[in-house]
Image (cartoon, rainbow, N blue to C red):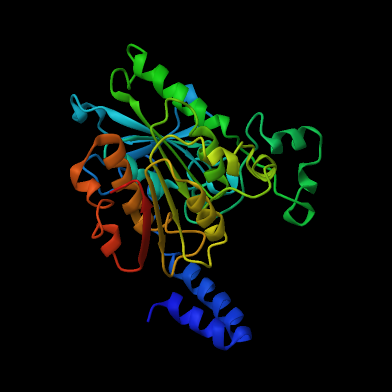
Amino acid sequence: MTRQRYLLRCGRTYPTAFVILVALATAFASFAQTVTPSYVSPDTPQGTGPHPAIMEADPGLSTHTIYRPKNLAALSAQKLPILAFANGACANRGNGFRYFLSEIASHGLLAIALGPIGPKEGEYEHIGNGQPAAGSPAAALAAAGKLAAATPASGPTPAYTTASQLIDAIDWAQAENDRRGGPYYGKLDTARIAVMGMSCGGLQALDAAHDPRVTTLGVWNSGTYGDDKRALEIAAAKATKAGLKTLRIPTIYVTGDPSDIAFPNTEDDYARIDSIPLFRAWREMTGHNGTYRQPNGGEFGRVAVAWLLWQLKGDKEAEKMFIGADCGICKLPGWHVKKKNID
């Protein structure tokens, strides 16, 4: 019996015990996901793909962190599609999802995370949101001397980043592709662009996905709120239930199991979206923190790579992970899948 079925059965029979079981199971899931790789320097190639990737700061985009194949020359005529990624907690730390994003970049993509590189401890645990990005709600509070008083107990934690930073990443990548003499000159596929985000960052990705240059969207442990103002308050993003109807690109939603705080938001979003290719997956024994900080991003990294290879590179093997009743993810232990307009 899966953990989910067991908990549901207990919930019907022993309501008080059910609450305790959910708390214990969630704690166990979080503990099980704390296995972390040994720390390596940013210039040490990472990932299981054919183009091991490094993490770096670029002076032309100091507000973000870049993940790219170390050996760009080895790409030959192959061009790198672009991924702009928004962090959980709307944190302004570009290395918080290092293992996940390095794995993606190692498969021949350029990934750009919001925020500069922060302390190495932020790669395996959440150590705060960094310094507020210019234009963010947290920056406005800091300028007014009120940021220290903004705590979860006093209301929604203000975003340290903005959805517009995802657009900044895309603008920069396009300009770099056209900049003669630059390392990315002619090497980027500016017609293949993804935006993704986790939790608070997922709301920012939902906003940025309306940019006409974006060709696919990934929403991780996230979903819109019934209150239209909520996303503006916590994510500096325009992500509403009504906005779901204007999405025009293939989209994937991934969460942990029902203990994931974002699970009901995602389920509601899925029910409301009906006009685009839509894939929804959740994984048992996985909480809101996902598997991002496991080696190579864990199971979530595996799913993200397959989706991006399919959507941005037309990879037929990756496509099999999502197509058909016996799709690759459908057969992976612990995964639950539903979809619209995919098969």
Tell me if residue 21 comes above or below residue 304 in the rendering: below
The quarter of the image holding the N terminus is bottom left
Residue 13: image location, x then y, percent: 55, 88
Q: Quadrant of residue 182?
A: top left
Farthest front residue in view? 274
Residue 286: image location, x then y, percent: 45, 65
Farthest bottom residue in view? 13
Q: Residue at x 51, y 66 (%)?
A: 258
Residue 101: image location, x then y, percent: 39, 44
Tell me if residue 64 comes above or below residue 264 in the rendering: above
Q: Residue at x 57, y 61 (%)?
A: 261
Tell me if residue 295 comes above or below residue 30 in the rendering: above
Note whether residue 93 is visible.
Answer: yes
Residue 301: image location, x then y, percent: 35, 52
Note whether residue 106 is visible.
Answer: no
Q: Residue at x 50, y 67 (%)?
A: 30
Query: Across the whole image, how many numbered discs are drawn on residues?
Result: 0
Residue 22 relative to residue 173: left or right: right
Q: Quadrant of residue 73?
A: top left
Camera-side residue: 198 or 229?
A: 229
Q: Residue at x 26, y 59 (%)?
A: 325
Camera-side residue: 323 or 294?
A: 323
Residue 130 relative to residue 325: left or right: right
Camera-side residue: 111 or 72?
A: 111
Tell me if residue 178 comes above or below residue 137 in the rendering: above
